[in-house]
Image: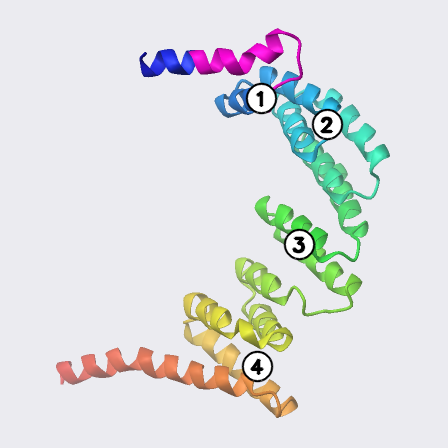
Amino acid sequence: MTKYTTLIALFCLLASPILRGQPADPRIADYYFQQGELEKAASIYEKLYLQNAGDYYFERYVSCLMDLNRFEECEKVLNRQIKREPQKVSLYVQYGRLFEKQNQEPKAAEQYKKAIDKLPADRFVVDNLASNFNSMARYDLSMQAYERGGLLLKNKNIFAFNLAELYRRKDNIAKMVTSYLDALQENPSFLPSVEAMLLRYSNGESEQTELQTQLYARIQDEPKVTIYPELLSWLFLQKKTIKMPFANSNRLID
């Protein structure tokens, strides 16, 4: 039996439950989705969602409807689900994406705000929402989600490491450095990760000066915290390492 014959036989086997009127097979839906056959995928995902009400099937179904420009139908589905689960913040993100697809930015912004406003004091939910915004390149919204999450969880530094990365993307060096230092204050075990990120993204003179200035201020304000002098020593070592090649090259020129 050739490879193609085997694939055809396997496909027929997977499709047979649908042909016999039995419950839809998610493998077939995923196959159609991956192949870009969204009409077929949407039909099966709808059945799976109605049978199981699972998040995965619902999200795939909504995604198909959006990509097929079946906006009115998609809005009805989302409204129905929001009535069932009004506190589920991911639904408002999907609703916002639906408006974005129709170039209705003010309505999209309203839905994104609802998602942030409805955040619970749950670290996983906060991180998931912020990550969703991050994947959409909506960095300001991701920041807002993390900042609100810190307020709800009564810990302003709990998402400091995540915020530092977002400030880096926004090219806000001062706030990036502040957030990395806040992350160390929250959890000193982050030191190797913070050093790695600073080495990668903050090796310019202005970035190093900002880090040095903030470290001096923190050492003065919190003299008993040992992690700041440790990071400052690391910074001086990096500066020395960077200067050495230039010194050697000058000797060669002389």
SS assignment at label 3: helix
Relative to 240, say whether 8 is above or below: above
Residue at image point 84% right, 40% down: 86
Which quadrant would the C terminus be assigned to in this image? Answer: bottom left
Name the residue tied to disc 1: 29
* Residue 55 picture location, percent across and down: 69, 35
Disc number placed over residue 52 in the picture, else none: 2
Residue at image point 66% right, 57% down: 143
* Residue 251 picture location, percent across and down: 16, 85
Closer to the camera, 7 or 98?
7
- Chain-order first, disc 2 or disc 4: 2
Disc 2 and disc 1: Cα gap in Å? 14 Å
Disc 2 and disc 3: Cα gap in Å? 26 Å
- Chain-order first, disc 4 or disc 3: 3
Task: Give the residues in magenta.
Answer: 9-26
Disc 4 and disc 1: Cα gap in Å? 54 Å
SS assignment at label 2: helix
* Residue 204 picture location, percent across and down: 41, 72
* Residue 43 picture location, percent across and down: 65, 16
The mark lying in front, picked from 1 and 3, is 1
- Chain-order first, disc 4 or disc 1: 1
Name the residue tied to disc 3: 127
Residue 13 counted in the magenta span: yes
